[in-house]
Image (spheres, helix red, strand yellow):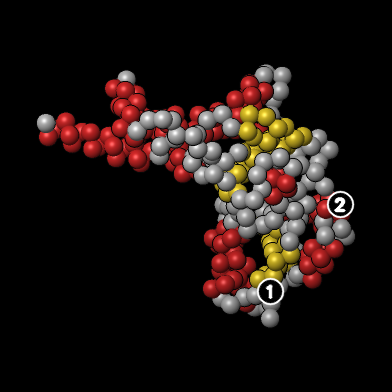
Amino acid sequence: MAKLYVVGTPIGNLSDMTYRAVEALKSADFIAAEDTRVTGKLLKHFGIEKPLMSYHEHNRKYAGDAIIRRILSGESCAVVTDAGMPCISDPGEDLVRLCAEHGVPVIPVPGPSAGVTALSVSGLDTSKFTFVGFLSTSPSSRKVTLEEVEKRPETLIFYEAPHKLCATLKDLLRALGDRKITICRELTKLHEEIIRTSLADAVNIYNDSDRKPKGEFVLIVEGYKAPPRAEMSVREAALIAQKKADGGMKPTDACREAAKETGFSKSEIYNELAAMKEERDGA
């Protein structure tokens, strides 16, 4: 029966291509590629001649249907991305889902992953981590995502393009506070760079007009560490939030800031504020 091979490719250094990955590409009847020009260079390097089919974010629906039809007719397919492991923060996940729905065997052929590679040299906690990937370009969606991961204790992994790096670093600092960060640029390539610093310093580094971001970035950010609870009650923490709200801050933002300062959770403070309001209203 025809199969789908999910083939990991190098994230920069072609020497990282595995023997099995080469064999998988040779054995497939055709290859579904994010960018056929990029994959064409990879195939030429390893002396592989196979038909290429474009499969990416913007054509995933109709191209995915076409790929499934070809597989069901007896042709095996290898899916690749421009660099790294396909189907991770990638439209290939839809193709795997289609294969599962149609009973098509899916064979993983593992290869490099930029996120895990960066994590391994970050110097931060690797026992637990959350892969966030690329943040949305929508300000409201970015805000929601950062609020969701703000209090997660595990290490966070982000991907970012050079033209959005400065804005993303500022957003991370604003949403998460000043934490440790490891910035990995152009991993495994000639100009590979690994910077271990803090978010505040990272913002300053790339605010320097002489240091224009270039290449692809992986950002490894320290997880949330709850501050030790101050010797205060949740009522006192709520009063801090109330003061911030009286100064014009939104109640939810006031509770979040008070939580950072006191060690109480945002929900604890918010509930206490609500109880205080009921007391005042009932007085």
Q: Residue at x 51, y 44 (%)?
A: 152
| Residue 208 versus residue 115 in the image, above or below | above
In the image: residue 273, left or right of residue 104? left
Q: Residue at 49% of width from left, 41% of height from top? A: 151
Q: Quadrant of residue 278?
A: top left
Using the rendered view, name the quadrant where residue 208 is placed: top right
What is the three-letter code of the residue carrying label 1?
Answer: Lys
Mark 1–mark 2 Cα distance, whole angstroms, equals 26 Å
| Residue 279 image position (x, y, % from top left) | 17, 34
- Judge from the rendering whether residue 198 lies leftward or rightward of residue 15; answer left or right: left
Determine whether label 1 and label 2 are within 8 Å by CB: no
- On the rendered image, what quadrant is the N terminus found in? bottom right
Residue 271 position within the rendered picture, expressed as x and y whole percent measured from the top left:
29, 40
Q: Residues within 10 Å of mark 1 (few under 14, many from 20)?
A: many
Disc 2 marks which amino acid? Ser
Q: Which mark is residue 15?
A: 2
The residue labelled by disc 1 is: 3
